[in-house]
Image (cartoon, helix red, strand yellow):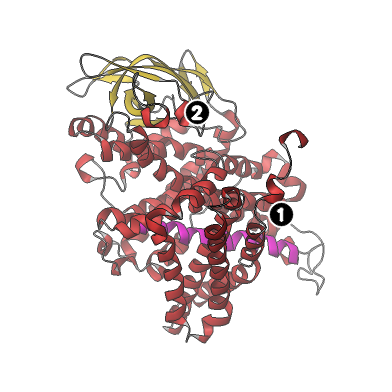
Amino acid sequence: MPSYTAPVKDMQFILHDVLKVTGQDVPGYSELEADFTSAILEEAGKLTSEVLAPLNAVGDTEGCILENGVVRTPTGFKAAFDQVREGGWPGLDMPEQYGGQGMPYVIGTAVGEFFSAANQAFTMYQGLTHGAASAILAHGSDQQKDTYLPKMVSCEWTGTMNLTEPHCGTDLGMMRTKAVPQEDGTYKISGQKIFISAGEHDMADNIIHLVLAKIPGGPEGIKGVSLFIVPKFIVNEDGSLGPRNGVSCGKIEEKMGIHGNSTCVMNYDEATGYLLGQEHKGMRAMFTMMNEARIGVGMQGLAQADVAYQNALDYAKDRLQGRDVTGVKNPDGPADPLIVHPDIRRSLMDQKSFAEGARAFMLWGASMIDRAHRNEDKDADGLISLLTPVIKGFLTDEGFDMTILAQQVYGGHGYIEEWGMSQFARDARIAMIYEGANGVQALDLVGRKLATDGGKHVMAFFDLVKNFIKENEGNEALKADFLDPLKAASKDLQAAGMFFMQNGMKNPNAALAGSYDFMHLFGHVCLGLMWAQMAKASHDALEAGAQDEEFYRTKLATGRYYMQRRLPATGLHLARINSGADTVMELEAANF
Protein backbone atom coordinates (compact mmCIF):
# COMPACT_ATOMS: atom_id res chain seq x y z
CA MET A 1 0.00 0.00 0.00
CA PRO A 2 1.34 3.47 -0.82
CA SER A 3 2.45 5.74 2.01
CA TYR A 4 2.69 9.50 2.47
CA THR A 5 5.09 11.69 4.41
CA ALA A 6 4.23 15.37 4.68
CA PRO A 7 7.08 17.56 3.30
CA VAL A 8 7.29 19.68 6.45
CA LYS A 9 10.91 20.69 5.98
CA ASP A 10 10.36 21.86 2.41
CA MET A 11 7.27 23.80 3.45
CA GLN A 12 9.26 25.50 6.22
CA PHE A 13 12.00 26.39 3.75
CA ILE A 14 9.53 28.15 1.44
CA LEU A 15 7.70 29.95 4.24
CA HIS A 16 10.78 31.20 6.05
CA ASP A 17 13.80 31.14 3.69
CA VAL A 18 12.01 32.15 0.49
CA LEU A 19 8.86 34.09 1.41
CA LYS A 20 10.28 35.30 4.75
CA VAL A 21 6.76 35.48 6.11
CA THR A 22 7.54 37.05 9.47
CA GLY A 23 9.16 40.01 7.71
CA GLN A 24 6.14 40.79 5.54
CA ASP A 25 3.79 43.63 6.45
CA VAL A 26 0.68 41.42 6.28
CA PRO A 27 -1.43 41.36 9.47
CA GLY A 28 -0.93 38.03 11.24
CA TYR A 29 2.34 37.17 9.51
CA SER A 30 4.53 38.40 12.36
CA GLU A 31 3.10 35.57 14.46
CA LEU A 32 4.22 32.91 11.98
CA GLU A 33 7.52 32.17 13.67
CA ALA A 34 9.33 29.05 12.53
CA ASP A 35 8.63 27.13 15.75
CA PHE A 36 4.93 27.99 15.52
CA THR A 37 4.49 26.96 11.89
CA SER A 38 6.60 23.85 12.46
CA ALA A 39 4.28 22.73 15.27
CA ILE A 40 1.21 23.17 13.03
CA LEU A 41 2.78 21.41 10.06
CA GLU A 42 4.16 18.54 12.14
CA GLU A 43 0.75 17.90 13.68
CA ALA A 44 -0.98 18.12 10.31
CA GLY A 45 1.64 15.79 8.86
CA LYS A 46 1.04 13.23 11.58
CA LEU A 47 -2.73 13.30 11.04
CA THR A 48 -2.48 13.01 7.27
CA SER A 49 0.13 10.24 7.19
CA GLU A 50 -1.32 8.13 10.02
CA VAL A 51 -5.07 8.64 9.64
CA LEU A 52 -5.98 9.94 6.17
CA ALA A 53 -3.43 8.26 3.91
CA PRO A 54 -4.35 4.69 5.02
CA LEU A 55 -7.98 5.48 4.11
CA ASN A 56 -7.10 6.59 0.58
CA ALA A 57 -7.11 3.08 -0.88
CA VAL A 58 -10.18 2.19 1.21
CA GLY A 59 -12.13 5.05 -0.33
CA ASP A 60 -10.95 4.09 -3.80
CA THR A 61 -11.93 0.43 -3.37
CA GLU A 62 -15.23 0.81 -1.52
CA GLY A 63 -16.54 4.07 -2.94
CA CYS A 64 -19.81 5.57 -1.72
CA ILE A 65 -23.14 3.74 -1.61
CA LEU A 66 -26.61 5.31 -2.04
CA GLU A 67 -29.23 3.59 0.16
CA ASN A 68 -32.77 4.94 0.47
CA GLY A 69 -31.66 8.47 -0.33
CA VAL A 70 -28.71 8.37 2.08
CA VAL A 71 -25.10 8.14 0.94
CA ARG A 72 -22.85 5.89 3.01
CA THR A 73 -19.21 6.98 2.90
CA PRO A 74 -16.35 4.42 2.92
CA THR A 75 -15.30 2.58 6.06
CA GLY A 76 -13.37 4.83 8.43
CA PHE A 77 -14.27 8.13 6.75
CA LYS A 78 -16.76 9.26 9.38
CA ALA A 79 -14.42 8.56 12.31
CA ALA A 80 -11.59 10.37 10.49
CA PHE A 81 -13.87 13.32 9.73
CA ASP A 82 -14.74 13.53 13.43
CA GLN A 83 -11.03 13.57 14.24
CA VAL A 84 -10.40 16.35 11.70
CA ARG A 85 -13.27 18.37 13.18
CA GLU A 86 -12.05 17.89 16.73
CA GLY A 87 -8.65 19.21 15.75
CA GLY A 88 -10.17 22.40 14.37
CA TRP A 89 -8.49 21.87 10.99
CA PRO A 90 -11.42 22.98 8.77
CA GLY A 91 -11.47 26.43 10.38
CA LEU A 92 -7.72 26.99 10.47
CA ASP A 93 -7.85 30.19 8.38
CA MET A 94 -11.49 31.16 8.98
CA PRO A 95 -12.55 34.15 11.15
CA GLU A 96 -12.46 33.69 14.91
CA GLN A 97 -15.88 35.41 15.05
CA TYR A 98 -17.41 32.24 13.64
CA GLY A 99 -15.27 29.72 15.49
CA GLY A 100 -12.24 29.64 13.21
CA GLN A 101 -8.63 30.15 14.26
CA GLY A 102 -8.07 33.26 12.15
CA MET A 103 -4.70 32.19 10.74
CA PRO A 104 -3.45 33.48 7.39
CA TYR A 105 -4.54 31.75 4.19
CA VAL A 106 -0.93 30.77 3.48
CA ILE A 107 -1.00 28.39 6.47
CA GLY A 108 -4.31 26.94 5.37
CA THR A 109 -2.76 26.35 1.95
CA ALA A 110 0.30 24.62 3.38
CA VAL A 111 -1.82 22.29 5.50
CA GLY A 112 -4.25 21.83 2.61
CA GLU A 113 -1.54 20.30 0.45
CA PHE A 114 -0.87 17.65 3.10
CA PHE A 115 -4.57 16.78 3.32
CA SER A 116 -5.04 16.59 -0.46
CA ALA A 117 -1.93 14.48 -0.97
CA ALA A 118 -2.91 12.02 1.74
CA ASN A 119 -6.51 11.60 0.63
CA GLN A 120 -7.93 13.86 -2.07
CA ALA A 121 -11.46 12.40 -2.08
CA PHE A 122 -11.82 12.73 1.69
CA THR A 123 -10.41 16.25 1.80
CA MET A 124 -12.96 17.48 -0.74
CA TYR A 125 -15.73 17.28 1.89
CA GLN A 126 -14.10 19.94 4.03
CA GLY A 127 -12.60 21.82 1.08
CA LEU A 128 -15.97 22.46 -0.56
CA THR A 129 -17.36 23.50 2.82
CA HIS A 130 -14.57 26.06 3.17
CA GLY A 131 -15.41 27.48 -0.25
CA ALA A 132 -19.15 27.66 0.46
CA ALA A 133 -18.47 29.33 3.81
CA SER A 134 -16.20 31.86 2.09
CA ALA A 135 -19.00 32.77 -0.34
CA ILE A 136 -21.46 33.29 2.52
CA LEU A 137 -18.84 35.30 4.41
CA ALA A 138 -18.30 37.58 1.41
CA HIS A 139 -21.89 38.00 0.22
CA GLY A 140 -24.26 36.90 2.97
CA SER A 141 -26.34 39.05 5.30
CA ASP A 142 -25.37 39.19 8.98
CA GLN A 143 -28.26 36.86 9.74
CA GLN A 144 -27.09 34.35 7.14
CA LYS A 145 -23.53 34.47 8.45
CA ASP A 146 -24.68 33.95 12.04
CA THR A 147 -27.00 31.12 11.00
CA TYR A 148 -24.65 29.07 8.86
CA LEU A 149 -21.00 29.98 9.40
CA PRO A 150 -20.34 28.69 12.94
CA LYS A 151 -21.51 25.19 12.00
CA MET A 152 -19.81 25.27 8.59
CA VAL A 153 -16.49 26.55 9.92
CA SER A 154 -16.46 23.63 12.36
CA CYS A 155 -17.69 21.26 9.61
CA GLU A 156 -20.59 20.11 11.77
CA TRP A 157 -22.43 21.13 8.61
CA THR A 158 -20.79 20.79 5.22
CA GLY A 159 -21.32 22.75 2.02
CA THR A 160 -21.50 22.30 -1.74
CA MET A 161 -21.61 24.32 -4.94
CA ASN A 162 -24.32 23.53 -7.50
CA LEU A 163 -23.66 24.86 -11.00
CA THR A 164 -23.73 22.18 -13.68
CA GLU A 165 -26.93 20.80 -15.22
CA PRO A 166 -27.33 17.84 -17.63
CA HIS A 167 -27.56 20.11 -20.68
CA CYS A 168 -25.05 22.81 -19.66
CA GLY A 169 -21.60 22.82 -18.15
CA THR A 170 -19.40 25.81 -18.88
CA ASP A 171 -22.25 27.75 -20.53
CA LEU A 172 -24.21 28.46 -17.35
CA GLY A 173 -26.47 30.95 -19.10
CA MET A 174 -28.36 27.92 -20.46
CA MET A 175 -29.38 26.65 -17.02
CA ARG A 176 -33.02 25.80 -16.38
CA THR A 177 -33.17 25.54 -12.59
CA LYS A 178 -35.68 28.15 -11.47
CA ALA A 179 -36.27 30.07 -8.25
CA VAL A 180 -39.83 31.29 -7.72
CA PRO A 181 -40.21 34.17 -5.19
CA GLN A 182 -42.49 33.58 -2.18
CA GLU A 183 -44.38 36.10 -0.07
CA ASP A 184 -42.14 35.44 2.95
CA GLY A 185 -39.01 36.44 1.01
CA THR A 186 -37.83 32.87 0.35
CA TYR A 187 -37.74 31.13 -3.03
CA LYS A 188 -38.92 27.76 -4.27
CA ILE A 189 -36.01 26.09 -6.08
CA SER A 190 -36.80 23.47 -8.72
CA GLY A 191 -34.44 21.73 -11.11
CA GLN A 192 -31.64 19.21 -11.36
CA LYS A 193 -27.91 19.65 -10.83
CA ILE A 194 -25.22 17.11 -11.70
CA PHE A 195 -21.61 16.43 -10.73
CA ILE A 196 -22.22 17.79 -7.20
CA SER A 197 -19.24 16.75 -5.08
CA ALA A 198 -20.18 15.84 -1.49
CA GLY A 199 -23.83 16.47 -2.41
CA GLU A 200 -25.10 13.87 0.06
CA HIS A 201 -23.26 11.90 2.75
CA ASP A 202 -23.46 10.63 6.32
CA MET A 203 -20.67 12.65 7.97
CA ALA A 204 -22.51 15.89 8.86
CA ASP A 205 -25.82 16.86 10.47
CA ASN A 206 -26.73 19.22 7.65
CA ILE A 207 -25.51 20.06 4.15
CA ILE A 208 -25.69 23.66 2.94
CA HIS A 209 -26.05 23.76 -0.82
CA LEU A 210 -25.22 26.91 -2.77
CA VAL A 211 -27.38 26.68 -5.87
CA LEU A 212 -27.38 28.78 -9.04
CA ALA A 213 -30.89 29.32 -10.44
CA LYS A 214 -32.90 31.81 -12.49
CA ILE A 215 -35.70 33.95 -11.13
CA PRO A 216 -38.55 34.04 -13.70
CA GLY A 217 -38.72 37.35 -15.54
CA GLY A 218 -35.03 38.12 -15.04
CA PRO A 219 -32.49 38.95 -17.77
CA GLU A 220 -31.63 36.33 -20.36
CA GLY A 221 -28.49 34.24 -20.20
CA ILE A 222 -25.84 34.48 -17.52
CA LYS A 223 -27.03 37.95 -16.43
CA GLY A 224 -30.22 36.40 -15.08
CA VAL A 225 -28.55 33.92 -12.73
CA SER A 226 -28.89 34.26 -8.94
CA LEU A 227 -27.34 32.29 -6.06
CA PHE A 228 -29.31 30.67 -3.26
CA ILE A 229 -28.61 28.97 0.05
CA VAL A 230 -30.59 25.71 0.09
CA PRO A 231 -30.03 23.67 3.27
CA LYS A 232 -30.70 19.92 3.39
CA PHE A 233 -32.60 20.55 6.61
CA ILE A 234 -34.35 23.86 7.26
CA VAL A 235 -32.64 25.76 10.07
CA ASN A 236 -35.00 27.11 12.72
CA GLU A 237 -34.65 30.59 14.22
CA ASP A 238 -33.01 29.14 17.33
CA GLY A 239 -30.42 27.34 15.19
CA SER A 240 -31.94 23.88 15.61
CA LEU A 241 -32.71 21.71 12.61
CA GLY A 242 -36.25 21.65 11.29
CA PRO A 243 -37.91 19.58 8.56
CA ARG A 244 -36.15 18.02 5.59
CA ASN A 245 -36.03 20.39 2.63
CA GLY A 246 -37.13 19.46 -0.90
CA VAL A 247 -33.67 18.39 -2.02
CA SER A 248 -32.54 14.81 -2.58
CA CYS A 249 -29.79 12.75 -4.16
CA GLY A 250 -31.08 10.86 -7.17
CA LYS A 251 -27.88 9.08 -8.12
CA ILE A 252 -24.18 8.72 -7.37
CA GLU A 253 -22.00 9.05 -10.45
CA GLU A 254 -19.64 6.16 -11.28
CA LYS A 255 -16.33 7.87 -11.88
CA MET A 256 -12.79 7.20 -13.03
CA GLY A 257 -11.37 8.35 -9.69
CA ILE A 258 -12.06 10.14 -6.37
CA HIS A 259 -14.35 7.23 -5.50
CA GLY A 260 -14.38 8.17 -1.82
CA ASN A 261 -16.19 11.41 -2.60
CA SER A 262 -19.91 11.26 -3.31
CA THR A 263 -20.47 12.92 -6.68
CA CYS A 264 -24.24 13.30 -6.83
CA VAL A 265 -27.15 14.11 -9.07
CA MET A 266 -29.17 16.52 -6.91
CA ASN A 267 -32.88 17.01 -7.43
CA TYR A 268 -34.58 20.18 -6.19
CA ASP A 269 -38.37 19.90 -5.89
CA GLU A 270 -39.66 23.29 -4.74
CA ALA A 271 -36.95 23.35 -2.09
CA THR A 272 -36.85 26.41 0.13
CA GLY A 273 -33.97 28.66 -0.82
CA TYR A 274 -32.62 31.94 0.50
CA LEU A 275 -31.10 34.54 -1.84
CA LEU A 276 -27.36 34.99 -1.27
CA GLY A 277 -26.25 38.42 -2.40
CA GLN A 278 -28.27 40.34 -4.97
CA GLU A 279 -30.82 39.13 -7.50
CA HIS A 280 -29.28 38.33 -10.90
CA LYS A 281 -25.75 38.71 -9.46
CA GLY A 282 -25.27 35.04 -8.73
CA MET A 283 -22.11 34.56 -10.72
CA ARG A 284 -20.38 37.33 -8.82
CA ALA A 285 -21.11 35.56 -5.55
CA MET A 286 -20.35 32.11 -6.89
CA PHE A 287 -17.00 33.24 -8.28
CA THR A 288 -15.86 33.89 -4.70
CA MET A 289 -16.18 30.17 -4.18
CA MET A 290 -15.02 29.17 -7.65
CA ASN A 291 -11.80 31.21 -7.57
CA GLU A 292 -10.89 29.71 -4.20
CA ALA A 293 -11.80 26.28 -5.54
CA ARG A 294 -9.64 26.74 -8.66
CA ILE A 295 -6.60 27.49 -6.53
CA GLY A 296 -7.47 24.49 -4.36
CA VAL A 297 -7.73 22.30 -7.47
CA GLY A 298 -4.32 23.50 -8.62
CA MET A 299 -3.09 22.32 -5.24
CA GLN A 300 -4.63 18.90 -5.92
CA GLY A 301 -2.49 18.58 -9.04
CA LEU A 302 0.63 19.35 -7.03
CA ALA A 303 -0.45 17.09 -4.16
CA GLN A 304 -1.07 14.00 -6.29
CA ALA A 305 2.21 14.57 -8.10
CA ASP A 306 4.09 14.73 -4.81
CA VAL A 307 2.59 11.65 -3.17
CA ALA A 308 3.07 9.67 -6.40
CA TYR A 309 6.70 10.85 -6.57
CA GLN A 310 7.36 9.84 -2.96
CA ASN A 311 6.25 6.29 -3.67
CA ALA A 312 8.02 6.07 -7.02
CA LEU A 313 11.24 7.22 -5.35
CA ASP A 314 10.98 4.53 -2.67
CA TYR A 315 10.34 1.91 -5.33
CA ALA A 316 13.27 3.10 -7.47
CA LYS A 317 15.60 2.77 -4.50
CA ASP A 318 14.40 -0.72 -3.56
CA ARG A 319 13.65 -2.44 -6.86
CA LEU A 320 16.65 -4.27 -8.32
CA GLN A 321 16.77 -4.29 -12.12
CA GLY A 322 19.81 -4.36 -14.40
CA ARG A 323 23.30 -3.05 -13.82
CA ASP A 324 24.65 0.50 -13.90
CA VAL A 325 26.46 0.93 -17.23
CA THR A 326 29.28 2.79 -15.50
CA GLY A 327 29.95 0.05 -12.97
CA VAL A 328 28.18 -2.20 -10.48
CA LYS A 329 26.64 -0.30 -7.57
CA ASN A 330 25.20 -3.22 -5.63
CA PRO A 331 27.86 -5.95 -5.77
CA ASP A 332 26.20 -8.07 -3.08
CA GLY A 333 22.90 -8.27 -5.00
CA PRO A 334 21.81 -9.78 -8.31
CA ALA A 335 21.19 -6.33 -9.81
CA ASP A 336 21.44 -2.63 -9.07
CA PRO A 337 18.47 -0.55 -7.89
CA LEU A 338 16.42 1.22 -10.55
CA ILE A 339 17.59 4.63 -9.41
CA VAL A 340 21.05 4.12 -10.90
CA HIS A 341 19.67 4.30 -14.45
CA PRO A 342 19.69 7.72 -16.17
CA ASP A 343 16.18 7.42 -17.59
CA ILE A 344 14.74 6.66 -14.14
CA ARG A 345 16.74 9.61 -12.78
CA ARG A 346 15.28 11.83 -15.52
CA SER A 347 11.75 10.78 -14.61
CA LEU A 348 12.29 11.29 -10.88
CA MET A 349 13.95 14.66 -11.43
CA ASP A 350 11.02 15.80 -13.59
CA GLN A 351 8.71 14.89 -10.73
CA LYS A 352 10.83 16.31 -7.93
CA SER A 353 11.59 19.62 -9.66
CA PHE A 354 7.92 20.10 -10.55
CA ALA A 355 6.59 19.32 -7.07
CA GLU A 356 9.03 21.58 -5.25
CA GLY A 357 8.63 24.43 -7.74
CA ALA A 358 4.84 24.11 -7.71
CA ARG A 359 4.79 24.12 -3.91
CA ALA A 360 6.62 27.45 -3.88
CA PHE A 361 4.24 28.80 -6.55
CA MET A 362 1.19 27.78 -4.49
CA LEU A 363 2.47 29.37 -1.29
CA TRP A 364 3.48 32.55 -3.13
CA GLY A 365 -0.03 32.71 -4.58
CA ALA A 366 -1.53 32.16 -1.12
CA SER A 367 0.56 35.02 0.25
CA MET A 368 -0.87 37.27 -2.46
CA ILE A 369 -4.39 36.31 -1.38
CA ASP A 370 -3.49 37.23 2.20
CA ARG A 371 -2.08 40.54 1.03
CA ALA A 372 -5.18 41.23 -1.06
CA HIS A 373 -7.58 40.46 1.80
CA ARG A 374 -5.68 41.53 4.90
CA ASN A 375 -4.01 44.61 3.41
CA GLU A 376 -6.76 45.39 0.90
CA ASP A 377 -3.99 45.47 -1.70
CA LYS A 378 -5.60 45.83 -5.13
CA ASP A 379 -2.35 45.14 -6.97
CA ALA A 380 -1.95 41.80 -5.17
CA ASP A 381 -5.59 41.01 -5.92
CA GLY A 382 -5.06 41.78 -9.60
CA LEU A 383 -1.92 39.66 -9.82
CA ILE A 384 -3.43 36.59 -8.15
CA SER A 385 -6.51 36.96 -10.35
CA LEU A 386 -4.22 36.86 -13.39
CA LEU A 387 -2.34 33.83 -12.06
CA THR A 388 -5.37 31.81 -10.92
CA PRO A 389 -5.96 30.12 -14.32
CA VAL A 390 -2.22 29.39 -14.51
CA ILE A 391 -2.24 27.80 -11.06
CA LYS A 392 -5.33 25.76 -11.89
CA GLY A 393 -4.53 24.79 -15.47
CA PHE A 394 -0.76 24.37 -15.48
CA LEU A 395 -0.41 22.64 -12.11
CA THR A 396 -3.17 20.13 -12.82
CA ASP A 397 -1.92 19.31 -16.34
CA GLU A 398 1.63 18.89 -15.12
CA GLY A 399 0.52 17.19 -11.91
CA PHE A 400 -1.33 14.50 -13.86
CA ASP A 401 1.68 14.00 -16.14
CA MET A 402 3.87 13.51 -13.08
CA THR A 403 1.58 10.79 -11.69
CA ILE A 404 1.94 8.99 -15.01
CA LEU A 405 5.72 9.28 -14.80
CA ALA A 406 5.61 7.93 -11.25
CA GLN A 407 3.46 5.02 -12.38
CA GLN A 408 5.92 4.30 -15.20
CA VAL A 409 8.79 3.90 -12.72
CA TYR A 410 7.02 0.77 -11.47
CA GLY A 411 6.86 -0.80 -14.92
CA GLY A 412 4.12 -3.46 -15.04
CA HIS A 413 3.55 -3.19 -11.29
CA GLY A 414 2.41 0.39 -11.80
CA TYR A 415 -0.52 -0.94 -13.82
CA ILE A 416 -1.55 -3.39 -11.09
CA GLU A 417 -4.05 -2.00 -8.60
CA GLU A 418 -2.44 -3.51 -5.49
CA TRP A 419 0.48 -1.08 -5.80
CA GLY A 420 -1.86 1.91 -5.69
CA MET A 421 -0.17 4.02 -8.34
CA SER A 422 -3.12 4.06 -10.71
CA GLN A 423 -5.25 5.75 -8.06
CA PHE A 424 -2.98 8.79 -8.02
CA ALA A 425 -3.32 9.11 -11.79
CA ARG A 426 -7.08 8.54 -11.73
CA ASP A 427 -7.63 10.99 -8.89
CA ALA A 428 -5.37 13.62 -10.47
CA ARG A 429 -7.24 13.37 -13.79
CA ILE A 430 -10.41 15.08 -12.53
CA ALA A 431 -8.47 18.17 -11.47
CA MET A 432 -7.89 18.99 -15.16
CA ILE A 433 -11.65 18.99 -15.73
CA TYR A 434 -13.67 20.33 -12.82
CA GLU A 435 -13.88 23.93 -11.62
CA GLY A 436 -13.56 24.98 -15.25
CA ALA A 437 -11.82 22.63 -17.67
CA ASN A 438 -8.25 23.62 -18.43
CA GLY A 439 -9.06 24.75 -21.95
CA VAL A 440 -11.50 27.23 -20.41
CA GLN A 441 -8.79 28.36 -17.98
CA ALA A 442 -6.53 29.10 -20.94
CA LEU A 443 -9.28 31.04 -22.72
CA ASP A 444 -9.97 33.00 -19.54
CA LEU A 445 -6.26 33.82 -19.19
CA VAL A 446 -5.81 35.07 -22.76
CA GLY A 447 -9.30 36.35 -23.46
CA ARG A 448 -9.93 38.19 -20.20
CA LYS A 449 -7.14 38.25 -17.65
CA LEU A 450 -4.29 39.58 -19.81
CA ALA A 451 -6.22 42.72 -20.73
CA THR A 452 -7.61 43.42 -17.26
CA ASP A 453 -6.90 46.99 -16.14
CA GLY A 454 -5.16 47.68 -19.44
CA GLY A 455 -2.67 44.84 -19.00
CA LYS A 456 -1.44 46.33 -15.74
CA HIS A 457 -1.10 43.03 -13.90
CA VAL A 458 0.80 41.08 -16.54
CA MET A 459 3.18 44.03 -16.80
CA ALA A 460 3.57 43.90 -13.01
CA PHE A 461 4.55 40.24 -13.34
CA PHE A 462 7.17 41.06 -15.97
CA ASP A 463 8.51 43.77 -13.66
CA LEU A 464 8.75 41.26 -10.82
CA VAL A 465 10.89 38.99 -12.95
CA LYS A 466 12.98 41.83 -14.37
CA ASN A 467 13.60 43.37 -10.94
CA PHE A 468 14.62 40.04 -9.41
CA ILE A 469 17.14 39.49 -12.21
CA LYS A 470 18.47 43.03 -11.92
CA GLU A 471 18.82 42.85 -8.14
CA ASN A 472 20.87 39.66 -8.39
CA GLU A 473 22.77 40.11 -11.65
CA GLY A 474 26.03 40.58 -9.76
CA ASN A 475 25.64 37.16 -8.11
CA GLU A 476 27.81 34.90 -10.26
CA ALA A 477 26.53 31.82 -8.44
CA LEU A 478 23.05 32.51 -9.82
CA LYS A 479 23.68 34.09 -13.20
CA ALA A 480 24.39 31.23 -15.60
CA ASP A 481 22.31 28.55 -13.92
CA PHE A 482 19.23 30.58 -12.92
CA LEU A 483 19.08 34.20 -14.02
CA ASP A 484 19.97 33.73 -17.69
CA PRO A 485 17.46 30.90 -18.25
CA LEU A 486 14.77 32.89 -16.43
CA LYS A 487 15.47 35.95 -18.57
CA ALA A 488 15.22 33.90 -21.77
CA ALA A 489 11.94 32.27 -20.67
CA SER A 490 10.48 35.64 -19.67
CA LYS A 491 11.35 37.01 -23.13
CA ASP A 492 9.45 34.09 -24.67
CA LEU A 493 6.43 34.98 -22.56
CA GLN A 494 6.63 38.63 -23.56
CA ALA A 495 6.98 37.67 -27.22
CA ALA A 496 3.85 35.52 -26.96
CA GLY A 497 1.95 38.40 -25.41
CA MET A 498 3.13 40.68 -28.21
CA PHE A 499 1.88 38.17 -30.80
CA PHE A 500 -1.58 38.28 -29.22
CA MET A 501 -1.56 42.09 -29.22
CA GLN A 502 -0.56 42.29 -32.87
CA ASN A 503 -2.87 39.55 -34.16
CA GLY A 504 -5.67 39.01 -31.67
CA MET A 505 -7.91 41.90 -32.66
CA LYS A 506 -7.94 41.22 -36.40
CA ASN A 507 -8.05 37.45 -35.96
CA PRO A 508 -9.28 36.35 -32.50
CA ASN A 509 -8.66 32.70 -33.37
CA ALA A 510 -4.95 33.47 -33.65
CA ALA A 511 -4.91 34.27 -29.94
CA LEU A 512 -7.34 31.58 -28.84
CA ALA A 513 -5.53 28.84 -30.77
CA GLY A 514 -2.40 29.68 -28.78
CA SER A 515 -4.09 30.13 -25.42
CA TYR A 516 -3.29 26.65 -24.09
CA ASP A 517 0.36 26.97 -25.00
CA PHE A 518 0.41 30.42 -23.41
CA MET A 519 -0.96 29.05 -20.14
CA HIS A 520 1.82 26.47 -20.05
CA LEU A 521 4.45 28.96 -21.12
CA PHE A 522 3.32 31.25 -18.29
CA GLY A 523 3.37 28.35 -15.83
CA HIS A 524 6.94 27.43 -16.70
CA VAL A 525 8.06 31.03 -16.24
CA CYS A 526 6.34 31.13 -12.84
CA LEU A 527 8.14 27.97 -11.75
CA GLY A 528 11.37 29.35 -13.19
CA LEU A 529 10.93 32.45 -11.04
CA MET A 530 10.24 30.27 -8.01
CA TRP A 531 13.36 28.18 -8.62
CA ALA A 532 15.49 31.30 -9.03
CA GLN A 533 14.18 32.62 -5.73
CA MET A 534 14.74 29.27 -4.03
CA ALA A 535 18.27 29.17 -5.43
CA LYS A 536 18.99 32.60 -3.98
CA ALA A 537 17.62 31.55 -0.59
CA SER A 538 19.73 28.38 -0.69
CA HIS A 539 22.93 30.27 -1.59
CA ASP A 540 22.24 32.77 1.18
CA ALA A 541 21.77 29.95 3.68
CA LEU A 542 24.98 28.22 2.63
CA GLU A 543 26.95 31.46 2.86
CA ALA A 544 25.53 32.00 6.33
CA GLY A 545 26.85 28.59 7.40
CA ALA A 546 23.55 26.71 7.49
CA GLN A 547 23.74 23.45 9.42
CA ASP A 548 21.85 21.34 6.89
CA GLU A 549 24.20 21.95 3.99
CA GLU A 550 22.99 18.87 2.12
CA PHE A 551 19.39 20.16 1.99
CA TYR A 552 20.40 23.43 0.33
CA ARG A 553 22.85 21.82 -2.11
CA THR A 554 20.14 19.34 -3.10
CA LYS A 555 17.75 22.24 -3.61
CA LEU A 556 20.25 23.96 -5.93
CA ALA A 557 20.85 20.78 -7.94
CA THR A 558 17.09 20.26 -8.34
CA GLY A 559 16.67 23.86 -9.44
CA ARG A 560 19.44 23.58 -12.02
CA TYR A 561 17.67 20.57 -13.46
CA TYR A 562 14.41 22.49 -13.88
CA MET A 563 16.12 25.48 -15.48
CA GLN A 564 18.08 23.35 -17.96
CA ARG A 565 15.69 20.50 -18.73
CA ARG A 566 12.16 21.83 -18.16
CA LEU A 567 12.18 25.62 -18.59
CA PRO A 568 13.33 25.49 -22.26
CA ALA A 569 9.81 24.25 -23.06
CA THR A 570 8.88 27.93 -23.29
CA GLY A 571 10.56 28.05 -26.71
CA LEU A 572 8.37 25.22 -28.01
CA HIS A 573 5.21 26.88 -26.70
CA LEU A 574 6.21 30.19 -28.30
CA ALA A 575 6.81 28.51 -31.66
CA ARG A 576 3.33 26.99 -31.53
CA ILE A 577 1.76 30.33 -30.59
CA ASN A 578 3.56 32.12 -33.44
CA SER A 579 2.20 29.60 -35.92
CA GLY A 580 -1.22 31.22 -35.46
CA ALA A 581 -4.58 29.59 -36.12
CA ASP A 582 -4.42 28.66 -39.81
CA THR A 583 -3.43 25.02 -39.36
CA VAL A 584 -5.72 24.68 -36.33
CA MET A 585 -8.81 25.98 -38.13
CA GLU A 586 -8.08 24.82 -41.69
CA LEU A 587 -10.24 21.70 -41.81
CA GLU A 588 -13.99 21.87 -42.25
CA ALA A 589 -15.86 20.08 -39.46
CA ALA A 590 -16.96 17.37 -41.88
CA ASN A 591 -13.34 16.53 -42.72
CA PHE A 592 -12.21 15.56 -39.23
As measured in the structure, the alpha-carbon distance from the residue carrying label 2 to the one carrying label 1 is 31 Å
Question: As drawn, is 322 to the left or to the right of 542?
Answer: right
Front tag of 2 and 1 = 2
Q: Which mark is residue 409?
A: 1
Q: How many marks?
A: 2
Compared to 465, does 232 lie above or below?
Answer: above
Q: Which residues are magenta?
A: 341-368
Please give the name of the residue rendered at 53% of the width and 47% of the height, measured from the top-left corner.
443
Please tell me whether the stretch drawn in magenta is mainly helix, strand or loop: helix
Sort mark 2 into few (<14), some (14-19) or many (20+) by Cα contacts within 10 Å: many
Q: Which percent across, then down, holds residue 45?
A: 44, 52
Which residue occupies the foreground of this view, 589 or 89? Answer: 589
Please give the name of the residue rendered at 48% of the width and 45% of the height, measured from the top-left corner.
297
Say what amino acid the circle numbered 2 marks. Ser
Question: As drawn, is 140 to the left or to the right of 257?
Answer: left
Question: As drawn, is 344 to the left or to the right of 274?
Answer: right
The residue indicated by pointer 2 is 262
Query: Quick check: can you spot residue 275?
Result: yes
Name the element at disc 1.
helix
Compared to 448, does 233 lie above or below?
Answer: above
Say what amino acid the circle numbered 1 marks. Val
Name the element at disc 2.
loop
